[in-house]
Image (cartoon, rainbow, N blue to C red):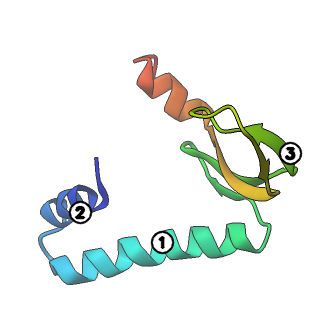
């Protein structure tokens, strides 16, 4: 599912809301999650999962095409851990 499909599904289930308002709400939620993660916070949505940031150290990598050594800089990457309720629902146990 892509973001526009998510917006459409929410708009369909909430006919009292304008489509543009649903789109703003979805964008705002995503922006808040991103801003919190940028600040180093963990974002937990109970029953769904938790978003956090992991630090990756600088390292020496390889170009897969040429085999040449390449410096890979340190970076921060998003990490998602599913919640218990989500795992159970995915496996039809809830």
The Cα–Cα distance between marks 1 and 3, rounded to whole angstroms, is 34 Å
Q: Earlier in the sequence, mark 2 or mark 3?
A: 2
**Label 2: few (<14), some or many (≥20) within 10 Å?**
few
Q: Secondary structure at mark 3?
A: strand
- The residue carrying mark 1 is 29
Residue at x 26%, y 83% (from the top left corner): 21
Classify the position of the C terminus by image quarter. Answer: top left
Drawn side of residue 34 relative to residue 72, left or right: left
In this picture, residue 50 sits left or right of residue 12: right
- How far apart, in angstroms, are the residues tagged by discs 2 and 3? 37 Å
Q: Are marks 2 and 1 in contact (CB under 8 Å)?
A: no
Residue under the image location 19 percent in, 56 percent down: 9
SS for dot 2:
helix
In the rendered view, tell whether residue 91 sits above or below residue 26.
above
Residue 58 location (% of width, % of height): 86, 51
Q: Which residue is mark 3?
A: 59
Frontmost of labels 2 and 1 is 2
Which tag, 2 or 1, sits closer to the chain's start? 2
């Amino acid at each position: 599912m892509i973001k526009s499909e998510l917006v459409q599904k929410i708009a369909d289930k909430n006919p009292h809301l304008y489509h543009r308002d649903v789109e703003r709400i979805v964008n705002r939620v995503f922006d808040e999650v991103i801003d919190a993660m940028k600040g180093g916070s963990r974002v937990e949505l109970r029953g769904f999962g938790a978003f956090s940031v992991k630090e990756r150290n600088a390292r020496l990598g390889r170009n897969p095409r040429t085999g040449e050594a390449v410096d890979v800089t340190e970076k921060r990457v998003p990490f998602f851990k599913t919640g218990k309720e989500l795992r159970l629902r995915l496996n039809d146990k809830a």
